[in-house]
Amino acid sequence: MKNLHFIGFLLLGLAFLLYYMLPEFAVVKLFEPMSLMGILAGIGIGLIIGGIVGYISKGTALKQDLKRKELVQLRKENEDLEKQAAELARQQTVTYTTTEENKNPPNY
């Protein structure tokens, strides 16, 4: 959005520069109805184009944010599943060792 503002001000400055370079330049002519209509039309077109670009860029940003949140959620679920698998594996090894000790007691 900052770049759009910069480009808008740059084009507005260019328009005033071109208007100033006209051979019949006068400050009074700047406020004539035809000049004001041109200025207002340029501002209106700029606002329309800026609104469309802003709407598209915001939609893209929202989609990227949603994807980031989903990725974080999937990583968290993956970590939880890995912890559960490690705990289950630890419990199974504990169960196997205790049952083997009970079946074959040592001979003294």
Image (tube, rainbow, N blue to C red):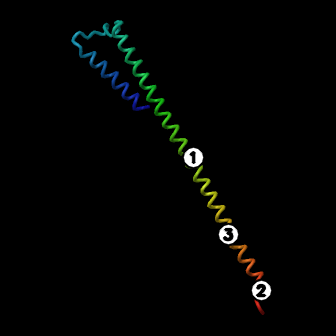
Q: Residues within 10 Å of mark 3 (few under 14, many from 20)?
A: few
For residue 17, what is the image quadrant? top left
Q: Give the percent coordinates (x, y) of residue 33.
A: 36, 6
| Secondary structure state at the residue bearing disc 2 | loop
Q: Earlier in the sequence, mark 1 or mark 3?
A: 1
Q: Residues within 10 Å of mark 1 (few under 14, many from 20)?
A: few
Q: Residue at x 66, y 68 (%)?
A: 89
For residue 105, what is the image quadrant? bottom right
Disc 1 marks a residue whose amino acid type is: Glu
| Secondary structure state at the residue bearing disc 3 | helix
The residue to which callout 2 is attached is: 105
The residue to which callout 3 is attached is: 90
Can you tell which mark lies on residue 104? none
| Residues at circles 1 and 3 in contact by the CB criterion of under 8 Å | no
Q: Quadrant of the C terminus?
A: bottom right
Q: Residues within 10 Å of mark 2 (few under 14, many from 20)?
A: few
The residue to which callout 1 is attached is: 70
Q: Quadrant of the N terminus?
A: top left
Residue placed farthest to the left in the image?
A: 23
Q: Give the percent coordinates (x, y) of residue 14.
A: 30, 22
